[in-house]
Amino acid sequence: DDDNDKNATNTNCNDEIKEIRLKSFKLKLPSSNWCLPDFDSELSHEIKVTYGASTTIASAESNKSNSTPLFSKEECQEVINAAELHFDGRNWTTLPSGEYDVAGSWIKDIPLVHKWFNRMLRRRLFPLLGREYPQFVSSMTDLVVDNAYIFKYTTETGRRTDIHTDSGCLAFTIALGGTYEGGGTWIDGFDDDEDGIVTMSCGHVTLRPGGIRHCGHAITSGTRYIIGGFCMHRKKVEYCRMLIGLGSELLLKPNNDEDEEARKKKARKVLEAALLINPNFDSAYTHLASTYDNDFEEEKKIKIITTLLSKSQSKKRRSCIYIGDVVL
């Protein structure tokens, strides 16, 4: 990292984002009781997208004076070139996303991209997150990136990701560009597009709480590059999200030293603890229902599913299919 960049002041960082404008989109939720897994009162049930990101989003309100992307086309192309150079004509590594596989890599594994990304975190992304979520972030130093990836979507190497929530309280998607048809990010409860898809031009960014359900929408041709990542707060523990993650891991990753029923009982206790902390985030119910799978427990399972549906973030077809896949 550049020493001069490490010494950049907050004022200098704020200068780099002062022209950046974001539009907030309130998500349409069927249940007034639904909330984020953690810090619901400090975050929001909305996504934030840079102005001018797409002609399909708030086009009437976007104008040339407010359509500055967070990253220039030249910067995005340099990142793509560095990633392609890293793989040097070889196939990209594959990252699993539920039932799908997508070509991609952890940013930390590509040195040139990693160096650029760390610099942009300090100079643009963290200051922007701090500005947009002032009730949650009091200083840039509060935030740390838990995971960040660069993805390469093609029809051959992975057209989309599975529906999921992120393992962090705040998340971001950066559109690096490419030549493609389709694509974008499907976000549960986003109704400004009839299909719930947020599309972005090169250099634009979407910010959102990590507990919002979403997925990478399928491309139909070409190649699409993005960066996706999520942040944690150094001073605030995400108890509910971490318990749900542990319960899910117990269910999905068998331990050969432990029988299946013992694992399910342990997962059940962990997920029930998550519900004690936050009974209004639907993901814990989804996984908990899958731990009841015999006739004796059928009544409990039905009760949990009924509660789940009453609290679900969305009743959209794609969301309901996701819930059914996990439970069954």
Image: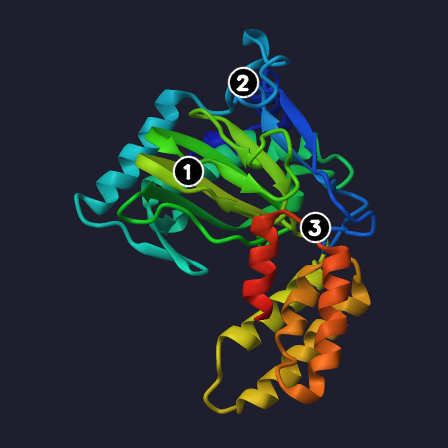
Q: Which residue is mark 3?
A: 313
Question: In percent of the image, x 75 and y 34: which residue is there?
Answer: 134
Please provide percent x and percent y for residue 202. 42, 25
Q: Residues within 10 Å of mark 3 (few under 14, many from 20)?
A: many
24 is higher (above) or lower (below) than 312: above
Q: Which residue is mark 2?
A: 52
Q: Residues within 10 Å of mark 1 (few under 14, many from 20)?
A: many
Q: Earlier in the sequence, mark 1 or mark 3?
A: 1
144 is higher (above) or lower (below) than 176: below
Q: Earlier in the sequence, mark 2 or mark 1?
A: 2
Element type at marker 1? Answer: strand
**Any mark on residue 6, and which?**
none
Q: Along the line of sight, which residue is nearer the eye, 285 or 93?
A: 285
Q: What is the three-letter code of the residue carrying label 3? A: Gln
Can you tell which quarter of the image residue 76 is in?
Answer: top left
Q: Which residue is mark 1?
A: 226
Q: Along the line of sight, which residue is nearer the eye, 324 or 222?
A: 324
Can you tell which quarter of the image residue 305 is in?
Answer: bottom right
